[in-house]
Amino acid sequence: MSFKEEVNDAILQVTSITALIQQSRPIRPGAKFDEEIEKKKQDKIAEARKNLQAGFSPERIESLLELSQKSMPMEVDEIIHKLERMEFLLEDVRKGKDRKNNLKSLIDSFKTTPLLQNALLAIPSLLKIANEP
């Protein structure tokens, strides 16, 4: 796999994890239930699951779903913010900018959420990009 393909694979995996966590968070208290919105959320979750199935076990995908459902909304917002930052850094790497040190630091920042850090460390292309000289 070429470097560009590995970066694209890492972006797809991180984007899918972000979508999975973002879409599986519970409805906020006081928000109205809308069937159309829920259907769209379920479609996005299904697509994210499909993208993650190549590199993740079903148990790991389920644990990521549980993470967003059991965490406080503020914690989920922080996780999503970090994942979006990782997507941004990977886009920069794809454009040829050297952001690998920032990427390593960001991966290390997930130590407070071991489940998510282990999921990120399970993405071989992400590790290869972060550790490449």
Image (cartoon, grey):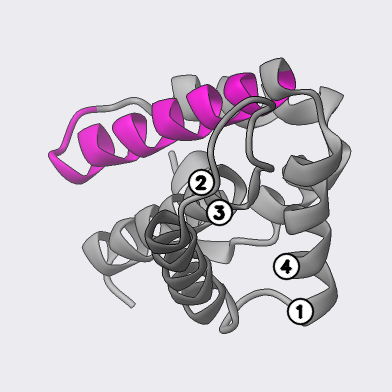
Residue at image x 52%, y 66%?
A: 45
| Relative to 83, residue 15 above or below | below
Q: Which residue is mark 3?
A: 17
Kindly identify the amino acid type of the residue bearing the numbered disc 1: Ser
**What percent of the width, then of the height, locates residue 100?**
42, 30
Count of numbered circles in the view: 4
Residue at image x 72%, y 54%?
A: 119
Q: Which of 79/5 is in front?
A: 79
Upstream in sequence: badge 1 or badge 3: 3
Marking on residue 18: 2
Kindly identify the amino acid type of the residue bearing the numbered disc 4: Ile
Quarter of the figure with residue 74: top right
**Dividing the image into 4 quarters, which one contains the N terminus?**
bottom left
User: Are the residues at dot 3 and dot 2 in contact (C-beta closer than 8 Å)?
Assistant: yes
**What percent of the width, then of the height, locates residue 16?**
47, 59
Q: Secondary structure at mark 1?
A: loop
Marking on residue 102: none
**What percent of the width, then of the height, locates residue 108?**
70, 26
Q: Main secondary structure of the magenta part?
A: helix
Is residue 81 inside the magenta stretch? yes
Per the rendered image, the range of residues in magenta is: 75-97
